[in-house]
Image (spheres, rainbow, N blue to C red):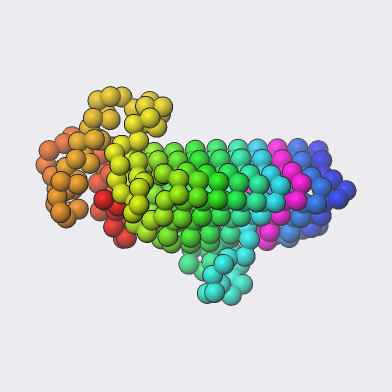
Amino acid sequence: MNQISPLAYVHPEAKLGNDNIIGPFCYIDRNTVIGDGNNLQNSVTINYGARIGNGNEILAGASISTKPQDLKFVGEDTLCEVGNNNSIRENVTISRGTASKGVTIVGSNNLLMENVHIAHDCVIGSQIIIGNSTKFAGEVVVDDCAIISAAVLCHQFCHIGGYVMVQGGSGFSQDIPPYVTVGKHPVRFAGLNLVGLRRRGFSNELIDLIHNAYRLLYSKGLMAEGIQEIKNNLPITKEIQYIIDFVESSERGIIR
């Protein structure tokens, strides 16, 4: 049975699962689907087009599936999908998609800290931490297990690889490849995310292999030459293939 505060508003067309807690002054619009066991504390807004999974905690002032902040948006019928077991803290805003992709996606087991903004058509993976007041512009992709520190500004269309650590206060407009730490001003490569990789169970041998891949990649003036060096000199494990595929598919270029 759901616990819905008498001070909350739930549209009669909204679809709720079981065992949800809907606190006072929450607003749940039509064309929304909420799964089981979610806890919406006070003053949470679930807007048109939201699809929310199970076991999420959403704190005061958060607004999910907001109207995109994109002048090309003309009211098309789009979605915002949120997975399971996320902690979405105070005043987080997540926009729904536009005609470009039709959906904004946030995976599962993420921590989105206070005042984070995720714009239209972003794809945020799982097991990600995003620090206070970090902002993602439209159509940003973040792969699993990334850590984005506080007050980071990410340009539209950027791709952030998995297992990275982005220094607080950074701003960038190029892609960040997997397994690395980036920071300083302007943002640049600062080595591997050693602490994060070890916490995730990466062996010393695998970390050395990834280190050698980046040594070869950044030793050349052109990324294509660096990738060829990797292919010629290193065993192509799934981790190395991930780096190769990431760099070869980058449209904005990667940070150096």
| Horizontal side, residue 56 vs residue 180: left or right | right
| Horizontal side, residue 52 vs residue 228: left or right | right
| Horizontal side, residue 219 vs residue 91: left or right | left
Q: Residue at x 80, y 41 (%)?
A: 2
Q: In which quarter of the image is residue 112?
A: top right
The verdict on residue 51 being magenta is yes
Where 202 sits versus 229, above or below? above
Q: In which quarter of the image is residue 240?
A: top left
178 or 105: nearer the eye? 178
Would you say residue 79 is visible in this rendering? no
Q: Residue at x 39, y 49 (%)?
A: 160
**Looking at the picture, how far across and down is residue 169, in whole percent?**
45, 49
**Looking at the picture, how far across and down is residue 137, in whole percent?**
48, 60
Would you say residue 191 is visible in this rendering? yes
In the rendered image, the residue lying farthest to the front is 185
177 or 131: nearer the eye? 131
Q: Residue at x 66, y 40 (%)?
A: 57
Q: Which residue is drawn at 31% across and 24% down?
A: 203
**Looking at the picture, how far across and down is residue 56, in whole percent?**
64, 40
Looking at the image, how many numbered discs can be counted on the residues? Answer: 0
Quarter occupied by the N terminus: top right
Where 207 sits versus 178, above or below? above
**Looking at the picture, how far across and down is residue 134, in whole percent?**
51, 51
The verdict on residue 206 being magenta is no
1 or 210: nearer the eye? 210
Question: Which residues are drawn in magenta?
Answer: 37-52
